[in-house]
Amino acid sequence: MGELFSFLYQFLDSFAFLILAAIGLAIIFGMMGIINLAHGEFIMLGAYITTFCAVSGVPLPIAILLGAIGVGIFGLIIDRIIIRHLYHRPLDSVVATWGISLIMTQGFLILWGPTLQGTSTPLGSFKIDGTSYSYYRMLLVVIAIGLLIFMYWLFMHTKFGLISRATMQNAEIASSLGVNTKRINSLTFMIGSMFAGLAGGLYAPTMSITPNFGNAFLVESFVTVLVGGANPLIGTVVSGSALGVVNSTLSFLFGTFYGRMGLLVVAILFIRVWPSGFSGLIEKKLMRVK
Amino acid sequence: MNKLNTENTVAALLFVYLLIYPFISSEYNIMNMSYFLAMIFLSLSLSLIWGYSGIFSFGQTAFFGVGGYAYAIISMNFNNPNLTLLSFILAILIAGAFAWILGYFMFYGGVNDVFVGLITLCVTLVLATFMAQTAGSQWKIGDVLLGGDNGINNIPSLTFGSVTLYGTNLYYVILIVLIVIYILLRKFGSSKFGYSLIAVRENRERSQMFGYNIPFLQTLVFSLGGVLAGLSGVFYAIWGNYMSPSSMAISAAALPVVLVAAAGRKNVTAAVIFSLIYYMFAQYLSVTGTEYAFVILGFVLLIAILLVPQGIIVTIFNLIDRYVFKKS
């Protein structure tokens, strides 16, 4: 019983981590075809803003929201200044966002030094069979699932969702029907950045706050998007669950480092067999039924 | 090749200068210059696969690390100066083979463009983290401890017969290999293989229709890039008698990309010149002690991408070509 719960806990934990780490990246990639290599640094920025607010007395939930909003605004500014010039040059956008990440990591190191006084993990813990588990981590799982439902609602049941899906499928036709595709792209980038900031804020109380905060998310988020494929909804959910199983099993058996290694190996093998990821696989299945 | 333009003139002047450099400089400077030259191979490897073939890789430092570590492990296991040349060759081949395997999984799987960048970045990061946690006596290959973050020390120098390479000898060996590879790369651009790679870069689908074996070409050139990056790593290990995981870490992985993108990715001369300038500048900065190097690099990269997507050096070449050599 204790063993089983411990495994389940580990699975839920890594599932939530993968989803939260990847969702912002997945939205930007799925909608705009741009990989934001500064994604880790956006997450880091969210964690910094949240920590600053929390340390100066703002209640943690509001601090996390402020982190998300702050990074969203930052993303909008970055999009206006840099990314919008590169909408049609995806490879160059990778290089440019890489430059942004260099500036941010080193800039934060110069401004605030190697570590920041963090906040402690809230909510305490519970014990089963002598092993203690954190309530906060379980809350993160609930939040991750809540976010997925929110995304589903946002993209499938709102006017914004309809327009942005149209832009994603065929930008030219959408714009000839009167959709301002540039504005949709900017909004998408902002929403993706917000989710990155949210992930940073949510994990800020559980990790030490350093300029390299984002590195912990980097491999996980890229691999999840890679395995998930182009569709940010289906892809992220399925690949988050599948990789969560891989990661938690390997971490459970051999330790966290092998969990991380395993993610990468599985991702490379998976891509070798199904290059378009889970979303490509599922879309193909659906097409066959019709 | 024998056309008179800025690129050729600059390259010729540069190499002549480098050839006489040991006569006009101190031993300390020669040693530094050997290091700069060794690192140029890394930029060249990226220029080859990104500039010529359109494969965007963050993983060149992974092959750099594999090459360096392979040389360290093999030569220290042989523990015989006469076999260092064999270790040298084996290490480069291992780096190439590693690149071939990775390339096989990516290109035959139909992975391209941005995703190649992501996979290679992830591989580099995982490899660096893996090597960094190999402290302790259980991590050894043969008789060689991997040493974790501290890396491997006392890596033997390269030896030909009774001559051990260090100082000026090593400088000339690296320089001559560099010149040979530079000329090969220039020729390569106008060879049949080079043209087919350019075709692949410009339009994969169309080249495939013409009957080119795209995944094979990509894997081949990717592993050639791996060989060059591995060569850089081996020279680095020989130069410093030292190899550590930080040479593969994320900041190191950034460098070749920044250098090649800012210089002009389709031009090997630009990559050579810009890398040389950067390393000299970085040496100057680290002597004067500054933490702004990466911030400056990041801005250079952004400005280059936004304003001169062709590359800074290439743009300068074109300007001089137009006004001095009256070419369009």
Image (cartoon, coloured by chain):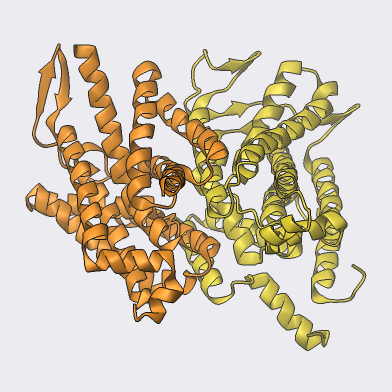
Which chain is orange in the picture?
A
Relative to the observer, which residue lies in front, B251 or A150? A150
Residue A165 can be seen, yes or no: yes
Eyeballing the image, is B280 above or below A116?
below
The N terminus of chain A, quarter of image: top left
Q: Where, by quadrant of the figure, is residue A245 drawn?
A: top left
- Of residues B3 and A276, which is closer to you in this image? A276
A210 is higher (above) or lower (below) than B3: above
Could you say where residue A138 lies in the image, as x and y percent from the top left? 16, 33
Question: Which residue does the image show at 22% across and 37% down from the upper left?
Answer: A206
The image shows residue B27, relative to residue B272, as above or below, that is above
Question: Which residue is depicted at the point 37% across and 25% down?
Answer: A256
- Whether residue A210 is visible here, answered yes or no, is no
Nearer the observer, A191 or A172:
A172
Chain letter for yellow?
A: B
Q: Quadrant of residue B317?
A: bottom right
Q: Position of residue A230 (x, y in %)?
A: 43, 52
Q: Residue at x 39, y 22 (%)?
A: A250
Q: Is residue A92 left or right of residue B87?
A: left
Q: Position of residue B307 (x, y in %)?
A: 54, 76
Query: How many circles with numbers are drawn on the protein?
Result: 0
The residue positioned 36% from the left and 22% from the top of the image is A249
| Pick the front one: B267 or A51 | B267
Q: Is residue A3 left or right of residue A62?
A: right
Q: Is B26 located above or below residue B227 in the figure?
A: below
Please indicate whether residue B165 sits to the left or right of residue B303 in the image.
right
Q: Residue A57: image x %, image y %?
A: 7, 52
